[in-house]
Image: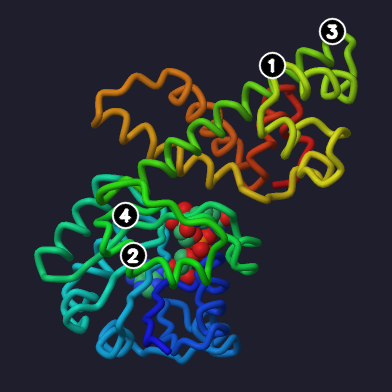
Amino acid sequence: MTHIAFIGLGNMGIGMAANLAKAGHEVRALDLSKDAVSRAVELGCTAAKNAQDAVETADVVITMLPAGAHVKLVYGGEDGVFRYAKANSLMIDCSTIDVASAREVIASAQHKGFEMIDAPVSGGVGGAQAGTLTFMCGGTQQAYGRAKPFLDIMGANTFHAGDAGNGQAAKICNNMLLGIHMIGTCEAFNLAEKLGLDAQTFYDISSTASGQNWSMTSYCPAPGPLPSSPANHDYKAGFSAAMMLKDLRLAQEAATSARAATPLGTQSEAMYSLMEAAGKDGLDFSGVMKLINGSLHDLDN
Ligand code: NAD
């Protein structure tokens, strides 16, 4: 049994913390929300009053927070993790944040003598509950090796993507590609319909031809072909347009600092910004189909 501090018990963190407790670890749970901490206690964790209480006896500290500013504050703030953590404790940040902040916080951890990795996830709330997440990790081989047994409890796949920040790089590059091919898939289905080709017929052809892609065959944005896809359930999220926009903004920030040309990534960010401006970013990200075919306002957010 390992003593683990888990900070950030939102949609994702609660399931991850519960799975660690279920595996027999002593999990000290901390969140700004008292309700979230109570839920974690019901699921087998113990409540921590503050960062000191959470981390001072922990061998491993795991965070699952909204954005880079929260991660910097939780680790490096005046009453943060770095101040109270045990010597030699391992730190794992699973939040999706900007690459620069991830590298800065990990460098700061190393400066203070701690090992730390960035380990953002894909797999959503369902994956967090089921323990089937995919982790994309950045950091030293040694820190990754120490983290892996815990990641294996919370996930089905883990990848070591290289040095600090490379987990975040893998995550935002993947999600930028996902945003781009989702929008392209929507455009193709919309054009097919306007040309008199029904969605099922186009799907049958294109899913076995060179236009095939994950957004089409696993998450089809046109109603009909895939009964389980959000398109057949009023585009209820799933993975919300707001979450996609967050990742596309991180990708654009990274592209600007790396001076990488991402013209389609830029366009994708603009498309999802329009969903946000329309107040429809709570819909699934495949709901961009409704923006493209002009019927976005037919749906409740
Ligand atoms: P969430 O907003 O539901 O949870 C974040 C939690 O962090 C909240 O409970 C909040 O109270 C807590 N928090 C914020 N500041 C804190 C602080 N200073 N101290 C303690 N707790 C604090 O978010 P989520 O959906 O669980 O997502 C978490 C991260 O995972 C994000 O970076 C997100 O981009 C990423 N992610 C989410 C999904 C998804 O489907 N929800 C999928 C993959 C990755």
For the residues carrying marks 3 and 2, which lies nearer the camera in this image?
2
Mark found first going from the N terminus, 2 or 4: 4
Q: Quadrant of residue 170?
A: top left
Mark found first going from the N terminus, 4 or 3: 4
Amino acid type, residue under disc 3 in the picture: Leu
User: Which residue corresponds to mark 1?
Assistant: 210
- Quadrant placement of the N terminus: bottom left
Q: Going 75% across and 34% down the picture, which residue do you hit?
A: 220
Q: Residue furthest left?
A: 111
For the residues carrying marks 3 and 1, which lies nearer the camera in this image?
1
User: Which residue corresponds to mark 2?
Assistant: 145
User: Which residue corresponds to mark 3?
Assistant: 195
Mark found first going from the N terminus, 3 or 1: 3
Tell me the CA gap for discs 2 and 4: 24 Å
Task: Mark 4 and mark 3 in contact? Answer it, CB < 8 Å.
Answer: no
Q: Going 27% across and 55% down the picture, which residue do you hit?
A: 139
Q: Answer left or right for 220 relative to 132.
A: right
Mark found first going from the N terminus, 1 or 4: 4
For residue 68, the mark is 4
Q: Secondary structure at mark 1?
A: loop
Pointer 2 residue Cβ closer than 8 Å to ligand 1: no
Q: Please rate how many residues cluster around mark 2, counting C-alpha atoms within 10 Å: few if below 14, some from 14 to 19, many from 20.
A: few
Tell me the CA gap for discs 2 and 1: 39 Å
Tell me the CA gap for discs 3 and 1: 20 Å
Amino acid type, residue under disc 4 in the picture: Gly
The vertical placement of 10 against 166, above or below, is below
The vertical placement of 248 against 95, above or below, is above
For residue 266, the mark is none
